Structures are given as C-alpha cells and as structure tokens.
C-alpha cells in the first residue's frame, strides 16, 4: 500500500521531541546511560495520595464507564480548586474531563470550528497544535514571535496576521508557553481575551503549565474576563506529574456543554475512570504540599542548567519564567550551528537527548534547541557535567 492510499489528514509532521525520545530509548536499551532532556516528562512521581486513591479504586472495582462529562466528584473538586487558586467561581457543570489536554483540543476544535476555518497559533510553539489543526481540516495561521516582545503575542500581531491571511476564527495561546517558558502579563492576557470577545473570535487558553512558575503566578484567562468565546484547557500531566495517566479538563461556556458532551460520547465515551479517581486526590491539600516541592526542584534545575549554558557561551536563552524548558539560540555560541545536526551530535557523543528548534518553529527554529529540566537533580547534575565537556570542545 502506497502513502497516496491514505487520507491527507494523516499527512502531518512528526512530533520531533517524541522521535528523539524513541531514539534515546533505543540507545538506552543497548546499555547507554542517556540524559533525557528532550521531553516534558517529569521525573517526579504523582503525589502519594494519588497512588493510594488509584489502588483503592482498583481494589473496589470502580473502573466502569463514567458520564461523558466526567465524575461529578472530580468536576466539583475542580470547581473548588479554581475558587481557591484563582479566586473565580466556575460552576462544576462547565468542567469537561478529558483524556489529557490533547483530547480537549480535539473536542474544542470540533465543537467550535468548521473545516477550513483559521486558527492562529504562535511560533515558536507546541508542534501538536498545528498538527491537530491540520488533521481536522482546519487552517493554521502561524504568527512569528520575537524577543522584542519577550516571545509573547499582542493584539497588533493578530491584526497584522488578519491583514495577510484574512479573518481569524480562533486564537490558541499558552501561558506559560512551550518551548520558551514565557508568560503573558495580566494586562496582555486581558487585551488578547477582550480582543477575541469583541471580534467574535474563539479564544483557547492553554493553561497546562500553570503551577510551574518561578516568579509571579500565572494568570488564568478566567480571571480577566469570562465570556462566551473563552475555552480554558488544562491537564494533570505537568504540574501534577501525571503524564501517563492521560487525564485533563476543559472549561467551556454553559451553552457549549451539551455540544462537547455529544462529541465526547461518540469519540471517547469518557476519560479513563481510574485516572479520574486519582485526579480527585491530586486536588487535595496533601497533594499540593508535595507538588510544591517539585516546583522547587525544577527551579534548582533551571538555575543550574542556565548557569552551565551561559558559562559555555549559549547566552541567548528565552526567559523561562514558567514551565520546565529552556529555549536557546545556538548562534549565540556559533553562527554555523544547526539544531538537528547539533542535537544528533549531542546524543551520539555526549549521551544527552534534547529537541531541535525546528519542532517548534519550522521557519526560524534551525538555530534553536530546547532543553527540558523536568528531571531529578542528580540527572541534571550529570547532564551539566556532560554539557560542560561537550560545549567546551566546541569553543
């Protein structure tokens, strides 16, 4: 069977970070000790109470289907969490429990947009956004970000994009962002949200890295204006250290709940039941106390990795105010360096896996690389030693 036999919807770019992880894992199976800085995979474990809740659910044989929208207990716990964390009141009925945030994006796009409509995304940005958009027969409009605005989007950027591409039907933005770790200020988030509301444009706010901040707290789009074009996406993967549990949530306008419910019923039936019970425990104070220790570990890792890179000449690094990534410009070390070649050489010669910048920015990413510092302290220490040796030979 030839590739032309398949649907063009499957003709999307690979997720390079996952390709690098596969190659690194294959090398590890041959006995090599690989430093995994390629994916946003926390080395920290899910909180103890999460594991206890999962064991109880298994022992009690509670693993049947749930309602398509999710367990009532989890939706109520999330409502209480938003009241405590963000000081906003969101009715439990507006929460939809999803199979990770990835399923949430699919549900949101299908509920809000028709084939051919335009969705604005940023570059650099999370590559799966564009790939999901394309696979659903939507049209991605990529807006290039730069250091002059701290790698963040402005309403003027949106208006300029519309002059070039025509009316934009939806905006997808993440704060903190992957791969840069930059965050929108409360004022900037307010301006973007209101601009979308006034234009009748959907505003998808990806808040998956909330909780992982190192200076000011991240602002939820719900705090700056809850309107009927706003959809908030989040997940238990990153801050809650529950990547493989595949559990997330979305907050939708009241009039959209039934639309998403019908889609969920037919596409996914419901999110994984075991993970839903575990997620309830992740929202308890006991879990929060444990998770805050994870944030301090990431802060330590970030500072140590930045110091290493800057000492060796990689001085141009995005701010990394949140998330657990460093996005570095190789040309600050040498204008001849190219990201995919550099990453391949680093893996082969220094046993360090990182992600080439072209995964996040097809046009300008060849000069950038992304490091993930979501690992144990001793793993970062080893990676720093290896980087010091490798980069020392390049200078």
Image (cartoon, helix red, strand yellow):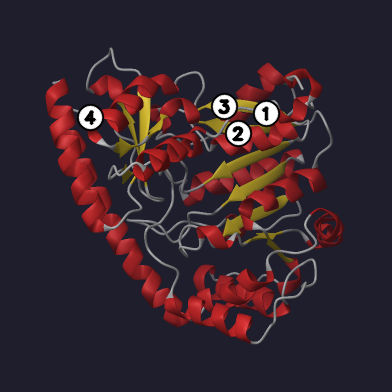
Q: Which residue is mark 4?
A: 314
The local secondary structure at tag 2 comes to strand
Q: Which residue is mark 2?
A: 121
Front residue (pair 315, 219): 315
Mark 2 is surrounded, within 10 Å at the Cα level, by few (under 14), some (14 to 19) or many (20 or more) other residues, namely: many
Contact flag, marks 3 and 2 (Cβ < 8 Å): yes
In front: label 3 or label 1:
1
Determine the CA span between mark 2 and mark 4: 27 Å
Q: Residue at x 12, y 28 (%)?
A: 392
Q: Residue at x 37, y 58 (%)?
A: 43
Horizontal side, residue 380 vs residue 119: left or right: left
Horizontal side, residue 386 vs residue 262: left or right: left
Q: Residue at x 50, y 76 (%)?
A: 50
Q: Position of residue 332 (x, y in %)?
A: 24, 22
Q: Which residue is mark 3?
A: 143
Question: Can the viewer see residue 312?
Answer: no
Q: Position of residue 228 (x, y in %)?
A: 76, 54
Which quadrant, please, contains the N terminus?
Answer: top right
Horizontal side, residue 39 vs residue 351: left or right: right
Q: Which residue is mark 1?
A: 140
Whether 209 is drawn above or below 161: the answer is: below
Whether 367 is drawn above or below 265: the answer is: above
């Amino acid at each position: 069977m030839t590739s032309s036999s398949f649907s063009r919807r499957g003709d999307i770019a690979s997720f390079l970070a996952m390709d690098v992880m596969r190659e690194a894992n294959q090398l590890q199976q041959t006995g090599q000790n690989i430093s995994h800085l390629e994916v946003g995979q926390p080395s920290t474990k899910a909180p103890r109470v999460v594991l206890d809740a999962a064991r109880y659910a298994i022992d009690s044989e509670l693993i049947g289907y749930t309602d398509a929208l999710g367990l009532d207990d989890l939706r109520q716990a999330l409502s209480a969490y938003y009241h405590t964390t963000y000081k906003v009141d969101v009715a439990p009925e507006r929460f939809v429990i999803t199979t990770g945030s990835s399923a949430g994006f699919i549900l949101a796009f299908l509920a809000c947009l028709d084939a051919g409509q335009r969705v604005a995304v940023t570059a650099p940005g999370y590559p799966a956004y564009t790939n999901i958009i394309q696979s659903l027969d939507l049209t991605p409009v990529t807006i290039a970000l730069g250091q002059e605005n701290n790698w963040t989007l402005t309403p003027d950027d949106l208006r300029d994009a519309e002059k070039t591409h025509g009316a934009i039907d939806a905006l997808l933005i993440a704060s903190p962002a992957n791969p840069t770790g930059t965050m929108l200020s409360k004022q900037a988030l307010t301006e973007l949200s209101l601009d979308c509301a006034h234009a009748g444009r959907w505003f998808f706010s990806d808040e998956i890295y909330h909780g992982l901040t190192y200076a000011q707290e991240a602002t939820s789009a719900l705090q700056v204006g809850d309107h009927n074009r706003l959809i908030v996406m989040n997940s238990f993967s990153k801050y809650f250290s529950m990547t493989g549990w595949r559990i997330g949530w979305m907050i939708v306008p009241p009039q959209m709940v039934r639309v998403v419910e019908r889609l969920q019923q037919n596409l996914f039936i419901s999110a994984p039941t075991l993970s839903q019970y575990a997620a309830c425990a992740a929202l308890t104070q006991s879990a929060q106390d444990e998770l805050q220790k994870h944030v301090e570990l990431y802060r330590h890792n970030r500072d140590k990795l930045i110091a290493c890179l800057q000492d060796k000449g990689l001085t141009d690094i995005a701010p990394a105010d949140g998330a657990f990534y460093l996005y570095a410009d190789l040309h600050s070390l040498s204008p001849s360096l190219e990201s995919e070649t550099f990453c391949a050489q680093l893996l082969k010669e220094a046993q360090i896996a990182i992600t080439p910048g072209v995964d996040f920015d097809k046009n300008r990413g060849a000069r950038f690389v992304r490091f993930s510092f979501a690992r144990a302290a001793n793993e970062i220490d080893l990676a720093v030693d290896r980087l010091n040796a490798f980069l020392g030979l390049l200078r």
